[in-house]
Image (cartoon, rainbow, N blue to C red):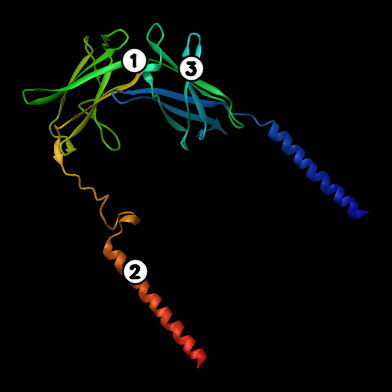
Amino acid sequence: MKTRMQFHSIFFLVFSMLFVSGIHGQSKKKVRVRINAAYVHVIDHEHYLNIKASARVDKETVEVSNAEFIVSQELEDGEIEIGTTTTNARGLSKFVIEDFDALTPDDDGFYHITVSFGGNDDFKRGSREVSFRKADIMAELVTKDSVNYVSATLIDVKLDSAIAEVPLTVQVDRLFRPLKIEKDFFMTDDNGNVEVAVPDDIPGVDGILKLEVVLNESDDYGTVKKILQEPIGTQIVDESTFDQRTMWSPRGKTPIFLLTVTLSFGFIVLGIFVYLFFNLVRIYKS
């Protein structure tokens, strides 16, 4: 009788735990996903969207990884799906617009792109619209009195006119962060033009400088970048030892002498074990 009562008690306890767990799972509140999307145009190279997904969980902002987004163009009579993309472990994704010329602007020249998240077990569905006009940067290197200048003009493609009073940044591409020339930005004049002197003491591999003229995060045009590669830098030699066998190289580039010494010690130790083994066999047989 006592055993039977214990069985019923254990059964009731397990059933209660499962019931409570089921209720808790059903009542779990989904979190809203925060979606950021920015349009970037690297002239003569690519158009893409930088997408970031995050959420506020337990009063902390966390990245939403492995979230799949549908990218579509919004038109007056509906929407057209462009493609899909998934965020990485840091909640980031770069969606390249493969055929930008196939997109259709509205009557004012604006493109309307929507980034949509369908939701999952943890997060609610959400979306973000990105609207932008198409801008172009015409840039060239000119030399006046032995001084090199970057001359650039910012143009609204739809209106086919210069864009005045807009900040442009002129910089040199570097591995970690770009080197800005003179100051953070230069305002375009009435003709949409800026002209920036390039110092002659900026080092570059083989004397090549990768110059960038950038319109940063404009409300109307997004980020637009024009790249110039010019042989106007102070020549330096690439002394990288990445493909050489050095002490600080990865395993595949271990120095030959170090491999030889290590393998020699290994064979010596192995030979000692083999010698001892045969001697033990001889002693055992005798």
Query: Label 3: which residue?
Result: 80
Q: How crowded is mark 2: few (under 14 residues within 10 Å), some or many (20 or more)?
A: few
Q: How far apart are labels 3 and 1 at the CA level?
A: 19 Å
Q: Which mark is residue 263?
A: 2
Q: Do the residues labelled 3 and 1 touch (CB within 8 Å)?
A: no
Tell me residue 278's x, y (percent): 45, 84
Judge from the rendering whether residue 230 lies leftward or rightward of residue 63; answer left or right: left
Q: Tag 1: residue type?
A: Lys
Q: Position of residue 103 (x, y in %)?
A: 40, 16
Find disc 1 in the rendering and name its residue: 134
* Residue found at the very far right of the displayed protein: 1
Who comes first in sequence, dot 1 or dot 2? 1
Q: Residue furthest bottom?
A: 286
Q: What kind of element bears circle 2?
A: helix
Left or right placement of residue 197 versus residue 162 in this view: left
Q: Disc 1 to disc 2, how far (Cα)? A: 62 Å
Label 3 Cα crowd, 10 Å radius (few <14 / some 14-19 / many 20+):
some
Which kind of residue does numbered mark 2 sit on? Answer: Leu
